[in-house]
Amino acid sequence: MNKKTVGYFLIVLSAVIFSTVELSLKSVSGHFAPLQLTALRFFVGGLCLIPFSLRALKKKGRRLKGADFGFFAIMGLLFVVLAMVIHQMAIHRAPAASVAVLFSCNALFATLLAGVFLKEPLGKNHFIALFFEISAVVIIISPWEQQLDLFGVCLALIAAFIYACYIVAGKKRSREYGGIVITCGSVLLGSLELLLLILLGNIPSVAAFLPQIGLPMLAQVPILPQISWDMLPLLLYIFIIVTAAGNVFHMIAVELTSAREAAVVFFLKPMLAPLFAWMLIGEALHWNMILGILLFLLGSGIALWGGGKATQP
């Protein structure tokens, strides 16, 4: 089996894994606070990535310095503390399938941001794709029917945009470190930053102040979760498969194929995630979701294969 074939297999495998992110997080969201679950899963996932990161650094002959950890801390703030916490909040308020489709907009956001800040060429196909994806978002939301929690929708889109900022911010340094090293450093330091935020929110005076400024979710978050034995298999799946293995497989796929081909992961996810949500937790597939998915796929296809560069998360 040649490298390209292995790469294509990993693209499909990554798409299947990433399509279960929102579904698996939704299944345990009632048992954990969003900050608590996010900090825990990225810390464990980051630990699992350490061996792969050390191997990548050794191949590059690279040793990390103090400034490198500062960069990872900024990336962790964008990725874990902001994007993933907001993403978890969106899952708590909106159907998993809807959040999965809306969050997949990050690939197009990243392409547009790279055009502005990294001066990567933007073709007409990217603006046509933007039209289709905005149309898809409007149809999925269906404000005239008020089926979805609009605040949850806004959270999903904000999370997608911040995640796109994380991708663009890390793109310049990806050749220096490698994608796995950036992911590992970001999630480990981001989870520690989130732990500091949790500890801060447990100080009585701070905990009393946070609800007054509209941030009750940051107040008195339990530090150590209560995990039952029946919940353990799903948590291990989230920590090891979704958070660690999914990112490793995707990064290896990028190395074996190309960034454009690996971006197909976020072309397949909008198709697979609603299907899994319907099959496993019984989320209904309404007409607006199906039409929105089709428009989203059309827009993504134009962005990926219509010319110009595509950016993958």
Image: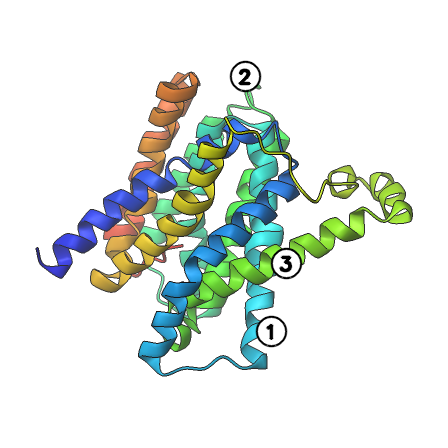
Residue 193 in the image: state x and y as whole percent: 66, 58
Kindly identify which residue carries mark 3: 192
- Residue 124 visible in the picture: no
Q: How crowded is mark 2: few (under 14 residues within 10 Å), some or many (20 or more)?
A: few
Report the residue that reaches farthest toward the left: 1
- Residue 126 visible at all: yes
- Label ID, residue 158: none
Query: In the image, is residue 288 above or below residue 9?
Result: above
Q: Residue at x 79, y 41 (%)?
A: 219
Q: Mark 2, mark 3: which one is toward the viewer?
A: 3
Q: Is mark 1 on a helix, strand or loop?
A: helix
- Report which residue position mark 2 lands on: 145
**Label pair 1/3, CB-CB below 8 angstroms:** no
Q: Which of marks 1 and 2 is nearer the N terminus?
A: 1
Q: Considering depth in this image, is 133 or 267 the residue closer to the camera?
A: 267
Q: Which residue is drawn at 78% across and 38% down?
A: 216
Q: What residue type is labelled 1?
A: Gly
Image vertical order of residue 162 relative to residue 141, above or below: below
> Residue tagged by mark 1?
70
Judge depth for marks 1 and 2 and give the one in front.
Answer: 1
Label 3 is placed on what type of residue?
Leu
